Amino acid sequence: MSTQTFTRTPIAPAKEDRPPAPPAARRRPNIHRVLSRVIVLAIAVVQVYPLVWLFLTSVRDEQDFASGNPFGLPTSFTLDNYARAFGQGDLGTYILNSLIVTAGADVLIVVCGMMGAYAIEVLGFRFSNAVRALFLIGIIVPVQIALVPLFIDYTRVDLLDTYPSMIIPLAGFSLPMALYLFSSFFAYIPRETYEAASLDGAGPYRIFARITLPMSVNTVVTVVMVNSIFIWNDFIFANTFVLSEDLKTIPLGLQNYIGAMGKTDWTATFAAVCVTVTPLLLVFLVLNKAMIYGLESGANKG
Amino acid sequence: MLPHRSKLSVAVFLLPPVLLYGAAVLLPIVQSLVLSFFSWDGITDMQFVGLSNYRHMLAGDSTFWTTFFNQLGYLAVCLTLQLGGGLAAASLLASLTRGREVLKVLYLLPAVISTLAIAFLFQRIYSMEPVGLLNGLLGAVGLDGLERPWLSDTDTALAAVSAPEGWRFVGLYTVILYAALLAVPREIEEAARLDGANQWQIFTRIRFPYIRPVWITTTIMATTYALRGFDIPYLLTNGGPGQASELITTYMYKTAFTSTDFGYASAMSVFIVIECLVAVSLILLVLRRKAV
């Protein structure tokens, strides 16, 4: 893996917005400025409109949906689709399963990521650079490589069709990025803090519990936020390792809505999609700063 | 290094992550490598077949090469939308004075939605009967001739399954590249402007060289994500019609879990990993050399 692109990055304080454009540029609203504003808004429409359409469709009645006119406001408003969505599938179970898997994987990622980063970055040892490189390579390893071996291993140890069968690979493949984010942050904590604590007789465990852990709260939020999105939406591991109805996560459960009766009830399906998408969407809208910050500092140097 | 650390404490902290990573990532890589030299259906005895899986893959299986080139097409669409679109959007965002934070959040919204929801959404967007968003839009601007069932037309199926993947991460790359553009010192740009440089020259001579390290990172991210792309093609068309939108990843998945040919599927998964490593090396070779 490149040392240049994934070198350790001290996570700098959040970047301030650029100062406003100089007055010279502001005085004449030229064609470039107008054009760039139009394009920027057009991209926003392309990114957001399909999602708006999703929500609009979920409150249309079937006739309105079937009659076409994909644009414009619905001519009808009904919550009946939501009633049918809850009636057709076990939405509550799917959401609960997704919560369990996401929480389980997040805990593993945070605990293992912090401990690994602490060992490599703060404690240090002889082959720490080699171990770091080994973990970083994981960032580019495709998940497909693990499907067949894990399927076979799970059959042997009787883990197929359980929560851990999803949690272990989801956490394992997210660990490299988490470890990278934590090491970047730990490198940013001044050495003097540790040295002072050491002089006072604190050992590695106490320093971890009293200094590193409390200072990392923001990084934990970022790591959890970035990973939760991928885990909550995971399809491939769940689809491969889970068979029974009562363990299905949201992406698997939603599949039940397609062609269950030979014909797909699209408006009810869209209502179900809206129900499952909303929790994460709300969390994202509240905590998007943490996520955006994580993405930026993950890829940018400082 | 901490003065009071002991070998034991290093081991205590290192053990949990190494166990997790080893069990979920490292061990399966080794197992796939081993399995790729065997023929096994999961029930009867494993049979050592040497390189014959690889020989079949590279020389005997025309489906494999179809899926390989489909994957490259998928990659091309994703890179164009994500890196091209992301860079354009990031540059435009950086030139705005207001509303940038809100726009960043709006751009990122599709990245929060599950691939299943996106597959449902695009199934309706591409639909012909009833008229979906895309065909409706084409009809509205007078391009009725282009209307078609995008997912079941062999000419358009591959592009149709690639576009949603590209679309959903445009915001991700916009946000990353935007942060990089903000770090370009304004004084240098101003000085160049005073010297008479136009917008394009400022971009190619100052901004882009400055964000090159981040550009390399995003190129690696986008490329490796596209090479492992699976969900949306699998859900939207399941490779069809025929093999028009079959990717190596979906072909490998079917080989493993529909035909239960674990050995051949493992050989393909090893190929996907090698493909990613080669792609990363190429990116570093090409983009780094230009930097010197």
Image: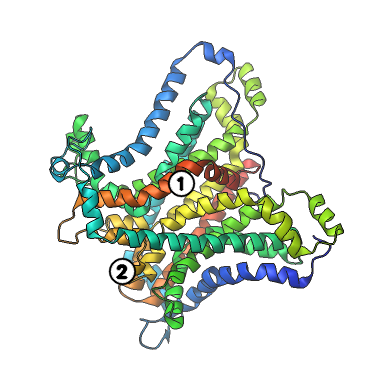
SS class of the residue under badge 1? helix
Residue B25: in sight, yes or no? yes
Q: Which residue is mark 1?
A: A283
Q: Are marks 2 and 1 in contact (CB under 8 Å)?
A: no
Q: Quadrant of residue B148?
A: top left
Query: What amino acid is at disc 1?
Result: Val
Q: Chain of mark 2?
A: A
Q: Give the residue at x 60% y 38%.
A: B211
The picture places residue A156, in percent across and down from the top left corner, at 44, 83
Q: How many marks?
A: 2
Pick whichever, A42 or B203, lies toward us. A42
Q: Which residue is mark 2?
A: A245
Residue B88: in sight, yes or no? no
Which numbered tag is attached to residue B268? Answer: none
Q: Residues within 10 Å of mark 1 (few under 14, many from 20)?
A: few
Pick whichever, A42 or A274, lies toward us. A274
